[in-house]
Image (cartoon, rainbow, N blue to C red):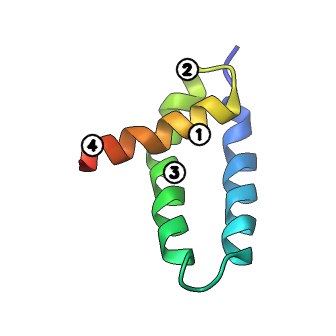
């Protein structure tokens, strides 16, 4: 069973975490959140573990950019 319903929960948790960061670190977290927003639907629809899906979504985006 996929964890698709968990994506909005993870995104909201990461956005709260972003607000707690120092101002200089917030742009980097914006990049991470954007990567999850772009790739999350595919990974969250395919995997059972929300942490694995989130990590894979972000790593996929970073690998594309490399």
Specify whether 21 is left or right of 36: right
Between 9 and 66, the one lying in front of the other is 66
For residue 29, above or below residue 53: below
- Per the image, the residue denoted by label 3 is 37
Q: Give the mark nearest the N terminus, 3 or 1.
A: 3
Between 51 and 3, the one lying in front of the other is 51
- Per the image, the residue denoted by label 2 is 46
Residue at position x 54%, y 58% from top? 33
- Residue 56, position as x, y percentages in the image: 50, 34
* CA–CA distance in space, label 3 to label 4: 15 Å
Pointer 2: residues within 10 angstroms few (<14), some, or many (20+)? Answer: some
Q: Give the mark nearest the N terminus, 2 or 3.
A: 3
Q: Give the mark nearest the N terminus, 3 or 4.
A: 3
* CA–CA distance in space, label 2 to label 3: 15 Å
Q: Report the disc number at residue 4.
A: none
Q: Give the mark nearest the N terminus, 4 or 1.
A: 1
Specify whether 20 is left or right of 52: right
* CA–CA distance in space, label 2 to label 1: 11 Å
* CA–CA distance in space, label 2 to label 4: 19 Å
Residue at position x 50%, y 57% from top? 32
Q: Are marks 3 and 4 in contact (CB under 8 Å)?
A: no
State the SS at label 1.
helix
- Per the image, the residue denoted by label 1 is 54
State the SS at label 3.
helix
* CA–CA distance in space, label 3 to label 1: 10 Å
Specify whether 62 is left or right of 2: left
Q: Are marks 3 and 1 in contact (CB under 8 Å)?
A: no
- Per the image, the residue denoted by label 4 is 64
Residue at position x 68%, y 20% from top? 48
């Amino acid at each position: 069973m996929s964890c698709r319903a968990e994506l909005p929960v993870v995104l909201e948790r990461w956005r709260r975490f972003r607000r707690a960061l120092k101002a200089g670190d917030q742009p980097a977290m914006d990049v991470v959140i954007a990567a999850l927003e772009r790739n999350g639907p595919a990974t969250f629809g395919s995997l059972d573990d929300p942490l694995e899906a989130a990590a894979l979504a972000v790593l996929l985006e970073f690998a594309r950019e490399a």
